[in-house]
Amino acid sequence: MIDFRARVRAALEERHMSMRGAARALNYDVAYLSRVLNGKQSPSLQLAEGLDALLATNGELVALATRPDQAEKNLPHRRHALHGDLGEGFACAIRDTSQRLIALDNDMNGLPIADVAARAYKSVHRQIGEGEYDRKAEHDIQSAAAELAEVAGWALFDAEKHQAARRFNQEALFLAKLSGDRSIELLVMQNMAMQAGWVGRPREELAIARSIIEQGRLSPRAEAIFRVREAKGLAGAGQESEASRSFDRARSLIQESKRCDDPYWAWWVTANEIDGHQGFAFQEAKQWRKGIPYLHRALSQEGGAKVGYRNISAVRLLGCLLGVEAWPEAEELAESIIPSIGETASARTLGLLGVTAQRGMSLPRATMGVRDALHSLSDALNDDPYAL
C-alpha cells in the first residue's frame, strides 16, 4: 500500500514540479519538506492539506497522513538521540525533542516542561558551540536548535521565569536569523511581544508587533497573531477603539487564511485564540461585561486547537463574572475549576487564579456560596501538589 511520502513524490513527478517549487508555493521551508519526504519528520495535518490542494489529490494525501495504519510509516524511521548522530540526525534529534515537549505542554492542562526544555537546549547549545556536528548540516541544525530554544523560552515564560525566558528567546532569535529560518524568527518575535505585554510593557508589545507587520510578507494567519499583539499593546496603552479595529482585522485574516499559506506553528492561531485575548483585554480594562462573551467562546474551542494553557481563559472569565456580580455563574465556574488545579502546571494560570480568588473573597456583596467556592479554590492552590 502506498504511503504519504511516496504519493507526494509521485504527484510531484506527475505535475513536473520540484520539491523546492512545492515548498515555495506553500510558503514552507524547503528543508522542512525535505525532512518529511525523506522520512526524517512526520507530516503535519497543515502540510498534508496544503500539498493536497496544491497537487489536486482530492483528499488522498490528508487521508494518508492521518490514517492509523499509515501513522507508523509517516514517522521518522528511528528516533535520534541528542548525543548520537551529529549530522542530519542531530537536527532530527533536536526536532524530535521539541515535538515531544510541545505534545507534553498541550497534554491535559499543560505538563511542566520548562526545566526539561532548558536543559535539553543547553546540551544542544554546548555541542553547537564546540562544533561537534557535520558542517554540511549546519543550517538545519541551527534551525532545529532555534525551535528548541523557542520552546524553552515559551515554557519559561509560562512558568513566570521571565529573565530566563528573555535569554532563551534571544538565543532562539539569534539562531533563527543565523539559519535563515524566517518561520521560527516570527514565532519568537510573537513570543517576545506577548511576554512584554504580560509583564506590563504594552508599548514594547505594540512596537514589536508593528515592526513585523510593517515588514510585510506575512501569511494571513501569521499576520493575524501580530494584529492580536498590536491590539493588546493598544489596549494596554488605553487606545481601546484602535485595539478593537486590530482585533477585527485579526479575525478577518483568519477567515481569509488558507492553511497551506501559513507557517507550520500557526495551528493554534484560531478565532478562539483571538477571543481569549480580546476577553483578556476587556478584563484588564475592567470592562467585565464586554469580556464575558469573548471568554465563553474562547473556552468553547469550537473548531479550535487544543492548547495546554486553555484554563487561563476560565480564570479570566471567573474574574469577569465576579466583577459583574454574577454570583451563581461565578460559583459554578469556581467549583468546576477546583478539580483541575492539581493538574495545572502553568504558573501564570495558577498565579492569576490566586489573585482572582483573593479579590473575589474580599467583595462585600459576594454570596456565601461564592465565598465558600473561592475558599475551597484557594485551599486547593495551597495543597500539596504531590498528594493523591
Image (tube, rainbow, N blue to C red):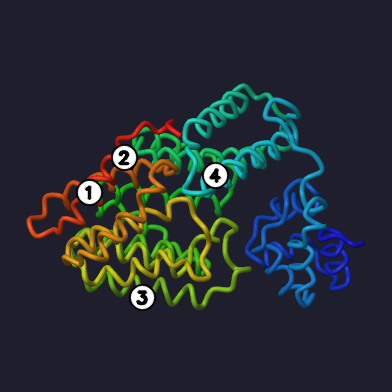
Frontmost of labels 1 and 3 is 1
Q: Amino acid at mark 2?
A: Leu
Spatial separation of the CA atoms under disc 2 and disc 1: 10 Å
Neighbours of disc 2 within 10 Å: few (<14), some (14-19), many (20+): some
Q: Which residue is mark 2?
A: 381
Sooner in the amino-acid sequence: mark 1 or mark 4? 4
Frontmost of labels 3 and 4 is 3
The N terminus sits in image quarter: bottom right
Whole-percent x, y for residue 75 in the image: 77, 49
Horizontal relation, residue 215 to residue 248: left or right: right
Q: Amino acid at mark 4?
A: Ala
Whole-percent x, y for residue 359 in the image: 16, 50
Q: Secondary structure at mark 4?
A: helix
- Residue at the spot 68% in from the left edge and 64% down from the top edge: 24
Compared with 377, 117 (above or below) is above
Whole-percent x, y for residue 180 in the image: 59, 48
Q: Toward the viewer: 295 or 78?
A: 295
Horizontal relation, residue 20 to residue 235: left or right: right
Sooner in the amino-acid sequence: mark 2 or mark 4? 4
Frontmost of labels 1 and 4 is 1
Q: Secondary structure at mark 1?
A: helix
Q: Toward the viewer: 243 or 211?
A: 243
